Image: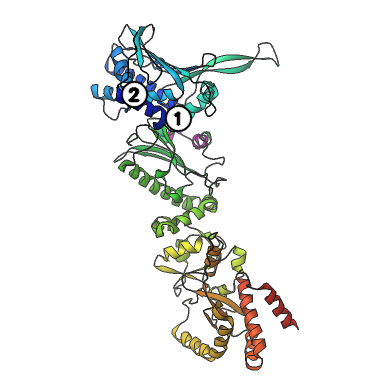
């Protein structure tokens, strides 16, 4: 029979299909299985409306048959089949969708799902095949037809023999090249893996002959290999089942099967949403951080399905960055997909789903915090930093969304507490939420700046992660209570009378402090008496936005920047060291200079800051000892 040519525009589209539209060759199997599922959907729908069609559920199936010797892969289905005209229309004109026409002709509402809509998926077969042969027999027809093509050169349609209704597609798999291994599409294990990845929840059984081993009858150690037809897809997605049907073990098993993590999740979230947008979702809050969580290789996102078919393995648009630890799937038939069904047309429905998911995650995290505090603290130990980054990023746009989820170690409770819990315990005369920033709880416990706050019985929150202060600077206040660092130059503690007393003391020491400031130069912004010190002789405080901990963090970044906090050297006027300093100021200026530099370096060491000249510091200590 003479070969027919594709229309010029169809020929161009076929070349585009093979080379550009799909990013992964393996997608061809998803597309052909989806088409087979469509064909079965059509005959199933016909059977519902036509009593003359007799079909049992067992009659609906899809089967894969790889043949390594012939280098063929066959995809069979028991669907509605195609007439000669339909072959010509559906396969001879690229981008004409038979499924879309079927829905229109039969006035099927959008609620009844038929996957195909673009009419291009079939041609993805040419990404791995030199030749494609389609043998089909339509429902109600006595004739079968064979469509055959080697690609853009054209196609033939001829009568042929086929006993059963349905379609059989035979792909003549390409030979391997230096860059591509086509043999893998003839391996049962690879095909099974692709079905699990993309088509596991197609509603009809996908069958394949697989080899198994069994003990030879009458033998204790001799095994034989045999071939058995097995169903390789799950068919019914767990997310479409009622929650009452599922146990915690079912959710954990799905988490493990889909390789969402090697741990056991802390909590699952099962959503069935109907309304402005319809979708199902199962999401998990993991307990442990993935090993690559903060690496470039880590990809956030939820697996996205439409009609049981995987569209995207990681749909990043469904999760904000601060919830990137969430794992799971979303299925919606309301989304607008692009022609390859690999990516989304970013639309209103997707935004609605993402917003609903974000709100649901917060509700579940708050519930976990309230009802299972130990579990929440384990979660926060792994992912609390990510929530804090969420507050700090985008200029604090999400601070109200995340602030209630934060935990910090408490000086009084000796455990992690929320900001709401802190505020609920604040004393009547306490103006601020006090915090201390340091590398560890142990390090903060040793900070001299905490003495006065603790002496007044005020609670201090410990900021031990590098992002803590940056996040709180963005938040600024919580429940109308401002945050105040214990290292701030102004703790807001002095009453009116105490302020006057402090000013008087400062005036008395004015000359001594001015000379110390002159000795230290631009290393400090000011030198003054301290109202916060009780047992320690000296400490550093700061003015302005940048704290000492922030200075350390910013200067540790690999961008060659130098950031300096505006430091204030504070002295304990009641300490014997100050008495020695004051005596040296009156009697020995060289010793006064030595004491000044030593006290400044001592304050640096207590803050964990480097001394500019360790050798000079060592010599100064030796001078003091002599």
Is 359 in front, or is 586?
586
Asked whether 102 falls inside the magenta stretch, the response is no
Q: Report if the CB atoms under discs 2 and 1 are less than 8 Å apart.
A: no
- What label does residue 493 carry, if any? none
> Where is the N terminus found, in terms of image quarters?
top left
| Earlier-in-chain disc, 2 versus 1 | 2
Q: Is residue 62 visible?
A: no
Circle 1 packing at 10 Å, graded few (<14), some (14-19), many (20+), is many
Q: Position of residue 11 (x, y in %)?
A: 34, 24
Task: Judge whether 547 appears above or below 91 on screen.
Answer: below
Q: How many marks?
A: 2
Is 169 in front, or is 322?
169
Point out the frontmost of discs 2 and 1.
Answer: 2
Q: Position of residue 311 (x, y in %)?
A: 41, 34
Is 401 in front, or is 622?
622
Q: Position of residue 60 (x, y in %)?
A: 40, 17
Q: Tell me which secondary structure the magenta stretch mostly adopts.
A: helix
Q: Secondary structure at mark 2?
A: helix
Task: Judge whether 267 appears above or below 504 on screen.
Answer: above
Most distant residue in the right direction: 626
Q: Is residue 558 visible?
A: yes
Where does label 2 land, which residue? Answer: 11
The residue under the point 38% across, 49% down is 359
> Where is the C terminus found, in terms of image quarters?
bottom right
Circle 2 packing at 10 Å, graded few (<14), some (14-19), many (20+), is some
Where does label 1 land, which residue? Answer: 198
Q: CA distance from mark 2 to mark 1?
A: 28 Å
Residue range (magenta): 244-255
Q: What's the image's color scheme?
A: rainbow
Residue 24 is left or right of residue 35, and the answer is right
């Amino acid at each position: 029979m003479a070969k027919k040519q594709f229309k010029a525009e169809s020929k161009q589209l076929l070349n585009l299909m093979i080379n550009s539209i799909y990013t992964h060759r393996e997608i061809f199997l998803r597309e052909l299985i989806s088409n087979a599922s469509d064909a079965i959907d059509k005959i199933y729908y016909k059977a519902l409306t036509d009593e003359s069609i007799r079909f049992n559920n067992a009659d609906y199936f899809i089967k894969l048959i790889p043949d390594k010797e012939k280098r063929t892969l066959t995809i069979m289905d028991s669907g509605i089949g195609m007439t000669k005209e339909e072959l010509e229309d559906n396969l001879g004109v690229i981008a004409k969708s038979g499924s879309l026409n079927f829905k229109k002709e039969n006035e099927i509402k959008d609620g009844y799902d038929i996957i195909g809509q673009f009419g291009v998926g079939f041609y993805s077969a040419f990404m791995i095949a030199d030749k494609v042969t389609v043998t089909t027999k339509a429902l109600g027809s006595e004739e079968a037809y064979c469509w055959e093509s080697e690609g853009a050169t054209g196609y033939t349609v001829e009568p042929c023999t086929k006993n059963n209704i349905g379609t059989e597609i035979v792909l003549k798999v390409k030979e391997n090249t230096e860059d591509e291994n086509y043999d893998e599409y003839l391996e049962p294990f690879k095909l099974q893996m692709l079905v699990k990845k993309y088509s596991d929840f197609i509603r009809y059984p996908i069958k394949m002959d697989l080899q198994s081993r069994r003990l030879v009858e009458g033998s204790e150690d001799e095994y034989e290999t045999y071939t058995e037809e097995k169903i390789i897809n799950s068919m019914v997605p767990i997310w479409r089942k009622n929650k009452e049907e599922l146990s915690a073990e079912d959710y954990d098993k799905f988490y493990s099967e889909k390789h969402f993590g090697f741990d056991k999740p802390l909590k699952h979230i099962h959503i069935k949403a109907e309304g402005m947008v319809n979708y199902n979702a199962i999401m998990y809050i993991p307990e442990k951080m993935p090993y690559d969580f903060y690496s470039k290789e880590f990809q956030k996102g939820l697996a996205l399905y439409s009609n049981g078919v995987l569209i995207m393995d990681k749909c990043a648009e469904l999760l904000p960055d601060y919830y990137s630890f969430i794992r799971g799937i979303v299925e919606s038939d309301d989304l607008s997909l692009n022609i390859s069904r690999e990516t989304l047309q970013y639309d209103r429905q997707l935004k609605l789903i993402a917003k609903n998911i974000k709100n649901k995650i917060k509700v579940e995290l708050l519930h976990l915090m309230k009802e299972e505090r130990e579990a929440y603290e384990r979660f926060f130990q792994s992912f609390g930093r990510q929530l804090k980054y969420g507050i700090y990023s985008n200029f604090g746009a999400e601070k109200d969304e995340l602030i209630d989820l934060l935990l910090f170690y408490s000086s009084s409770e000796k455990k992690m507490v929320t900001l709401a819990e802190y505020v609920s315990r604040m004393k009547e005369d306490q103006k601020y939420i006090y915090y201390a920033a340091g590398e560890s709880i142990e390090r903060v416990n040793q900070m001299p700046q905490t003495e006065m706050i603790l002496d007044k019985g005020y609670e201090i929150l410990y900021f031990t992660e590098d992002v803590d202060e940056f996040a709180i600077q963005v938040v600024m206040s919580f429940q109308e209570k401002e945050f105040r660092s214990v290292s701030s130059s102004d703790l807001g503690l002095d009453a009116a009378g105490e302020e006057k007393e402090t000013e008087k003391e400062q005036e008395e020491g004015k000359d001594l402090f001015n000379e110390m400031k002159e000795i230290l130069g631009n290393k400090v912004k000011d030198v003054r008496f301290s109202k916060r010190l009780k047992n320690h002789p000296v400490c550093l405080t700061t003015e302005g936005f940048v704290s000492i901990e922030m200075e350390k963090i910013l200067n540790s970044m690999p961008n060659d920047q130098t950031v300096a906090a505006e430091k204030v050297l504070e002295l304990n006027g009641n300490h014997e060291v100050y008495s020695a300093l004051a005596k040296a100021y009156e009697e020995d200026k060289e010793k006064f200079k030595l004491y000044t530099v030593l006290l400044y370096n001592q304050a640096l060491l207590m803050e964990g800051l480097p001394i500019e000249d360790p050798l000079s510091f060592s010599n100064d200590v030796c001078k003091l000892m002599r």
